[in-house]
Image: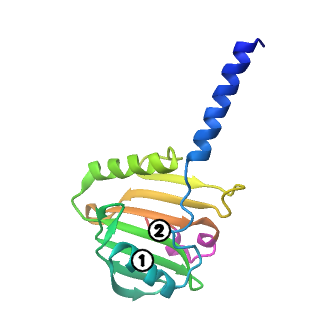
Amino acid sequence: MNTRSTATLLSLVLSTTMFAAAAASPDGFLDIPWGSSSEEVKQQLIGKTGTRHGRNEADTVIYHGGTFAGRNVNAFKVWFTGGRLFRGDVFFPAGTGRSAIDALKKDLTAKYGPPKASGKVIRWAFPVSPSHKEPESIELSEHKDNQIRLSYFSETLRASAPAGSKDDL
């Protein structure tokens, strides 16, 4: 291999490594650590988004209104297993449609890199690495009544959650 080929290959490897290192990972839901209690989640979620507590259900809490990434939100739904946060859903208002999904996908791709799967459910996966202690994922999909759902998961805690709460798509 000549010097020019070696320099080109080294440049390509370095730029790829820098891009991979630059891609963020979620590290919780809205920077609320996985495993947090419902009271910790409530305080932080209300403080960060301006949402209002709606109602408690079995292993979930629903909040109404607020904002997420500068966008108006219809509702937040946070999920618990064994009293510990393992999933956070953001529901964007009905009628925002495909252009809103495309805009969210573009923003998430800019922050986290390209999704691992596309189609009906667009998915980003974040495996364990030296800089990332817990496997996580993000899913973007169209939900009932034309709402858009953005879900964040702790894959470790998701595995121990009741069957109906793991996917619910």
Q: Amino acid at mark 1?
A: Leu
Q: Which mark is residue 163?
A: none
Disc 1 secondary structure class: helix
Q: Residue furthest left?
A: 95
Residue 115 in the image: state x and y as whole percent.
50, 47
Disc 2 secondary structure class: loop
Highlighted magenta segment, given as a residue range: 157-166
Categorize mark 1 by other alpha carbons within 10 Å: few (<14), some (14-19), many (20+): many
Residue 134 in the image: state x and y as whole percent.
65, 64
Residue 78 in the image: state x and y as whole percent.
45, 76
> Mark 1 — residue?
45
Categorize mark 2 by other alpha carbons within 10 Å: few (<14), some (14-19), many (20+): some
Relative to the observer, which residue lies in front, 107 or 58? 107
Q: Is residue 53 left or right of residue 115?
A: left
- Residue 120's place in the image compared with 31, above or below, is above
Q: Main secondary structure of the magenta part?
A: helix
